[in-house]
Amino acid sequence: MPTVQDVAQRAGVSTATVSYVLNGTRFVSEVLRERVLAAVRELQYEPNAAARTLRSNRSATIGLLISDLQNPFFTEAIRGIEDFAQARGYTVILTNSGEDAVRESACLRALRARHVDGLIVAPAGGRYAELDELVAGRFPLVFLDRDVAGLNASAVMLDNQAAAYAAVNHLIELGHERVGMIAGRPPLSSTTERQAGYRRALHDAGVAIDETLMVTGGSTIDGGAAAADALLQRAARPTAMFIANNLMSIGAMMVIERHGLSVPGDMALVGFDDFAWADVLRPRLTTIAQPHYELGRAAAELLLDQVSGEAAVPRRVLLPGTLVIRDSSGAPEWRRVPVAGRARWS
């Protein structure tokens, strides 16, 4: 059975460097880190996790609690988290709350029982005791995609307001003044931020805001279908819709077709969260693309900086999105338009 000395010899480094890489206790350059991890793979070295935990008071595992495994947004985000964590010698334990705060609380307790070194959480909604205890105890914690009002914790998210503004402004530039919005679940920070971007785009263009054109779709296909149906029942229905997540966009397109209307001829659409189906749907969906992988990677980096003691103060990271113009908005040509702004770390 290979030992840490064998790994060090194969990588051409000291045993201390091997320990730093596997335990994440000190900074090691990417070149040396890759050499150590390559040696670990070649020798099939398996450190004694229990002994390592006793020595360092760390488990070299992090917990990842996402809100909805069915949402394609999380696929690439999870990959970004795992790639960064594994390069630092950490294993990721994945759990899913199913957008249920009670289940989320139970998942957090289960992850803490596994002695994880830190947590990345895509919260399902509001505050509750377990989150308050984590923040009060300064346990390494990063919120992903959404944050929780009133909690002073690190968060990595899209600049949702700027992205929504760009989406709605695109429809306004195409001549639409009655732009409906299908929003996600009301408690979520991402929902309120996208609603704010929608409102600001209309206001800046001098377009009156009609509250009856703002509905919620619950962030699901069925919810998006029901919300689109409600908008189409309006006496003065919209000529365009901004739909605040990918699953709701699918439901909306199904209902629009069921009403005998065409996209974009009768109804222009812009969705949110670019995904593989967006280029397969007919018409192809104009949408806001999120940097899913980069969001996940940034969350893992921020968390492991906390675990190692390099980041004592909570930080908020906002990454910009991209407006991907395809057929559904009725634009004359396809193109990708970076949303104004840049990545912001604060």
Image: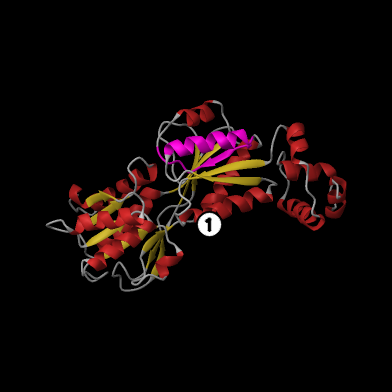
Residue 46 visible, this angle? yes
Q: Is the residue 182 above or below the residue 327 in the image? A: above
Residue 179 visible, this angle? no
> Quarter-wise, where is residue 119 in the image?
top right
Farthest residue, direction left: 235
Identified at 74% across, 51% down, the residue is: 33
Disc 1 marks which residue?
76
Q: What residue type is labelled 1?
A: Glu
Magenta span of residues: 101-125
**Residue situated in front as seen by the camera: 203 or 97:** 97
**Residue situated in front as seen by the camera: 166 or 99:** 99
Identified at 26% across, 68% down, the residue is: 257
Q: Is the residue 299 above or below the residue 133 in the image? A: below
Magenta span contains residue 120: yes
Residue 327 location (% of width, % of height): 33, 71
Indicate left or right for 225 with 59 as reference: left
- How many residues crowd mark 1 within 10 Å: few (<14), some (14–19), many (20+)? some
Magenta span contains residue 123: yes
Identified at 86% across, 50% down, the residue is: 2
